[in-house]
Amino acid sequence: MKKLILCSVIAFTLTGCKTELSTSVSVSDLLSKQVKTVTSDLLVEVSACGDYQDSRQPSKSLLEAQAKVPDIFTSAEYVECFRKDMDSFAHFKIPVSVGNSNDSGSTKGIHLYGNDADILAISIPKEIKKKINKADSSIASKTKISINVRNDTDKVLNMTGLSVFLNDKDPMVISNFGLKAGSEIKLTLSNVSVASALDERFNFTPVLMAMPE
């Protein structure tokens, strides 16, 4: 299941709940001049999937998530509600635009792109940020955003990871590394990066910087 663990975006709607957003992209799509749309998975924690009086009916928190998420992401589609370990999550699919750094200001949703300086940056429209922060001002601490990046070029790409976790284990503050051709990595934004991505003062948050060849 692809999850742009941009999950963060949903936790904001339900105070005290966790949100996860995850997606998968390729380097060529990030650097492309053409914008394409990929489907990302958004998980929003709910108290339960079924009503406590009648489990065949949706719970109040699930109904609330089904109403609030599309209000923030206009093209969000509800998929299902499920339990994972001891937690219950409402699963939504949301569109994420990829590519063309010059078009970041005109997109209506989450935008991932690269350019000469950055291989990967994330941009979220201010209107969406306002809705998220209005719903929960502490959303950044409850949000998890994960991005799988595949090097579909024919060469090793040298880059610098900025305030992220590599493959769920290695913390990268300002860390240089090489991504082999054909290989894929998972990047999970730190709390600082998530807070930056949701801050209305910033137009974008860099995640991977290109290193001079």
Image: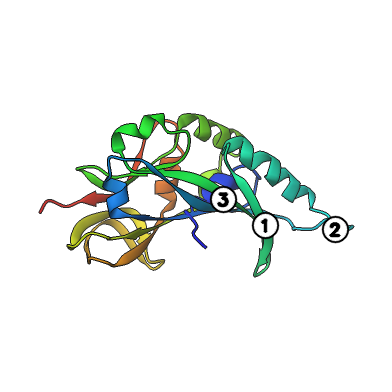
Q: Position of residue 107 (x, y in %)?
A: 42, 33
Residues at badges 3 and 1 in contact (C-beta under 8 Å)?
A: no
**Along the horizontal axis of the image, is 115 left or right of 140?**
left
Q: Position of residue 141 (x, y in %)?
A: 52, 49
Relative height, residue 162 to residue 129 (above, below) = below
Cα distance in 3D space between marks 1 and 2: 18 Å
Residue 26: image x %, image y %?
Answer: 33, 55
> Which residue shows up at 50% across the image and 45% down it?
95
Q: Tell me the amino acid under the disc marked 2.
A: Tyr
> Which residue type carries mark 3?
Lys
Count of numbered labels shown in the rendering: 3
Residue 93's mark? 3
**Secondary structure at numbered mark 2:** loop
Residue at image x 29%, y 54%?
27
Residue placed under numbered mark 2 in the picture: 52
Query: Dot 1 corresponds to which residue?
Result: 80
Residue nearer the viewer, 154 or 111: 154
Measured along the vertical axis of the image, is residue 197 above or below residue 44? above
Crowd around label 1: few <14 · some 14–19 · many ≥20 (10 Å): few
Check if mark 1's residue and mark 2's residue have beta carbons within 8 Å. no
Task: Give, as a three-letter code, the residue at label 1.
Answer: Glu
- When asked about the image quadrant of residue 168, the answer is bottom left
Q: Is residue 205 left or right of residue 12?
A: left
Disc 2/disc 3 C-alpha distance (Å)? 26 Å
- Disc 2 residue crowd, few under 14, some 14–19, many 20+, Cα 10 Å: few
For label 3, the SS is: strand
Left-right relation of 12 to 24: right
Of callouts 3 and 1, which one flags the residue occurring earlier in the amino acid sequence? 1
